[in-house]
Image: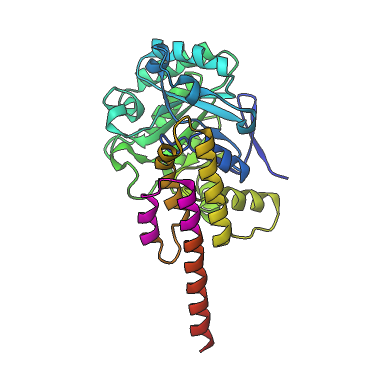
Amino acid sequence: MIDTVNIGGVSLKKTAALAPMAGVADYAYRIMCREFGASYMVSEMVSAKGICYSDRKTAELCTVTDGERPMAVQLFGSEPDFMAKAVEIVLQYEPDIIDINMGCPVPKVVNTGAGSALMKDTDLAASITEAAVKAAGKTPVTVKFRSGWNADSVNAVKFAKALENAGAAALTVHGRTRDQFYSGISDSGIIKAVKEAVNIPVIGSGDVTDLASCLKMYEETGCDLVMIGRGSYGNPFVFREIDSWFSGKPYTPPTVEEKMEVMLRHIRLIISLSEKSEEMAMHEARKHAAWYMNGCYGSAKFRGRCYQLSSYEEAVSLSEEFIELQRWHSAQKNKQNFV
């Protein structure tokens, strides 16, 4: 039987969760990952100030469907008043959890004083959290952040304690500094230190790409839940692998045929959920198609061709060609082994 972790009354399977990823983890992506076993997911980040000014994309970004639950809506901002107002607005979409982003490293977010910039001002971060918690009422508020701003200011433990005192129901820690962005190696020691310093659940994030790295994260940090981001690119199967292990069920890695079948289903979802034309929706689908081909023979050339796709039928033809190449390559290897 799979263990669970409780976040402010919300019970989550202790397997693996899907990280919030702007421009990637949209509704279609979340549906695919949930289907393959993601235990919990967080929306793409939404601007608190944008919500307060009735941003037209609010409903699209904040809507939570029953099939996605348990799910959090993630907000970012640098002003407590705007954050509190945004939380009140978001509550109408009935998220299970409100998450605050204090870890995004991209300049357009950091330059507004939000995201990982808040790690330079613990008092302000705590004030934002406290305002959100007060506005959220019974809905738990969590915070996602990094190990620090840079190598000279690794302050995750101090930061975590302040957020716990401000009322956060759980914390997600990515083991890199802002300066690292997504380069180098995630420091699991920081996640462990935070876990040992607070009395609320801690979610570990960074460099989890398969069952082995997931189990390593649990073992090395003692975290309550593991979160997967880039490791799920074109790979919703990672959630099935992890869920199977914790459920005591056998796991069979996907064949190239299954990868292409799932890729095409993902593309169909993107097209069906988009308000744009098929050609425009395919622009969004291109990167996903390319990711599903990673790690296979000749994938570099095919990934390049993915970025030229303009229709679903083109994607079907490309996937069939890709499968044929993999079968040919497998046959060649078998011949060499026989000789």
The x and y percentages for residue 114 are 34, 24
**How many numbered marks are there?**
0
The residue drawn where x is 45% and y is 10% is: 85
| Residue that extends furthest to the bottom in the rendered view of this protein | 339
Quadrant of the rendered image containing residue 157: top left
Position of the N terminus, as image quadrant, is top right
The x and y percentages for residue 104 are 36, 32
Indicate left or right for 175 with 98 as reference: left
Magenta: predominant secondary structure element?
A: helix
Q: Toward the viewer: 276 or 51?
A: 276
**Is residue 32 in view from this perspective?**
yes
Looking at the picture, does residue 330 appear above or below residue 191?
A: below
Looking at the picture, does residue 174 appear above or below residue 216?
A: above
Looking at the picture, does residue 287 appear above or below residue 336?
A: above
Q: Is residue 5 magenta?
A: no
Q: Is residue 307 magenta?
A: yes
Indicate left or right for 93 with 113 as reference: right
Q: Toward the viewer: 2 or 60?
A: 60
Q: Toward the viewer: 69 or 124?
A: 69
The x and y percentages for residue 90 are 51, 17
The colour scheme used here is rainbow
| Residue that extends furthest to the right in the rendered view of this protein | 1
The residue drawn where x is 51% and y is 48% is: 217
The x and y percentages for residue 23 are 41, 36
Q: Toward the viewer: 68 or 125?
A: 68
**Is residue 219 in view from this perspective?**
no
Magenta range: 301-319
Quadrant of the rendered image containing residue 117: top left
The residue drawn where x is 56% and y is 21% is: 140
The residue drawn where x is 46% and y is 20% is: 58
